[in-house]
Amino acid sequence: MALWFVFALMTAAAVFAVLWPLGRSPRRQREGSEAIVYKDQLAEIERDAAAGLIGTAEAEAARVEIGRRLLAADDAERELPARSNIRLRRAVAVIALAGMPLLAAAFYLPLGSPYLPDFPLSQRAQGPAASQPLDNLVAQVEAHLEKNPTDGRGWDVLAPVLAKLGRFDDATRAYRNAILYAGDTGSRRADLGEVITVAAGNVVTADAKAEFERAVALNADEVKASYYLGIAAEQDGRASEAAAIWRAMLAKAPQDAPWRPVVQAALARVGGPSAPVLSNDAIAAAKDMSEGDRGAMIRGMVDRLATRLKQNGDDVEGWLRLVRAYMVMGDRDKAKGASADARQAVANDAERLRALNEGLKNLGVDG
């Protein structure tokens, strides 16, 4: 309230200083007016005449002319509307003095926040999240968790942010606290294992593998944990085990799963086809066929696969299977043509294109 009063006084003083000259009456400046000059000239003529410097006729003519001008100057000063002007200026000054603050208040009250309390600098950092840097928000959450270390929700929110900032040791501690205070789930165990892996230079360490195994034990469908268990098998030189893990993931995954291209690329990397060209039932039936019939059946299935992929080209796994089938059949030209068609079909999807290129590279097809 005191601050409001000070501001009001400052505003009034500023307005008063500007408008004060308007309220003053215009004093007639006798010392420098035209009438004073003419009177001085008359006195000078009298002195010159008395001293004999000018003749009587010239002195009289000069008196008449200067007297005429003096009368005209007096008449002009009397005709100035001094009183009406001073009243108008004073009215303008009063209206401005009272109107400017009222006009400002009329705009401020609906648009401003007259009842907002003081906002010290220490509290300004606690403003809306969207307007603050990420480091400030992290510092606020960390300060909160220092006072409330059992806030599992807080640790769960903080952990992925710390991982994004590259603070892997702090992120590991945050995930462990989230598991301790918010509950042990497959997703939290998988996230913890991933942070440990990234901190180790993308190597699945024994600690990370243990976390992934716990995640799968809690949720058999935990995608991230299963994928990294395949990575662990690949890094240990057990390519067939890695391929088996990833094939099982693909078999259960929907066609539009966003992680399918990543797993497909990993499967192609270890040298395993995404899926066999023929199903197990077809392979069993083909054993009893003649060589010609078996070849015709395989070609028919490959052609049907090619037709389906032309209608729906998003299936990276299907394209790799088709290319591999052409390679097995010894038709390298068709394999190259299929690879070109595949790249064109997934050109707008960076993840699928990357998975396709890695798979084609492992199959020995350049383009």
Image (cartoon, rainbow, N blue to C red):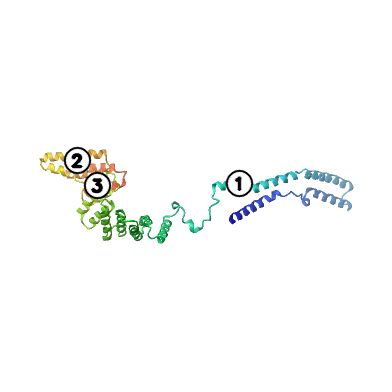
* Pointer 1 or 2: first along the chain: 1
Q: Is residue 337 above or below residue 191?
A: above
At mark 1, the secondary structure is: helix
* Kind of residue sitting beneath label 3: Lys
* Pointer 3 or 2: first along the chain: 3
- Number of residues whose C-alpha sits closer than 10 Å to that of mark 3, classed few (under 14), some (14–19) or many (20 or more): few
- Of 178 and 263, nearer the camera is 178
Disc 3 to disc 2: CB gap under 8 Å: no
Q: Which residue is mark 3?
A: 252
Q: Compute the Cα span from label 1 to label 2.
A: 83 Å
- Number of residues whose C-alpha sits closer than 10 Å to that of mark 1, classed few (under 14), some (14–19) or many (20 or more): few
At mark 3, the secondary structure is: helix
Q: Is residue 294 above or below residue 239?
A: above
* Kind of residue sitting beneath label 2: Val
Instruction: Please report the residue visible at 78 percent of the width from the left and 52 percent of the height from the top.
Output: 31
List x then y, in percent, for residue 87.
72, 45
Q: Which mark is residue 103?
A: 1
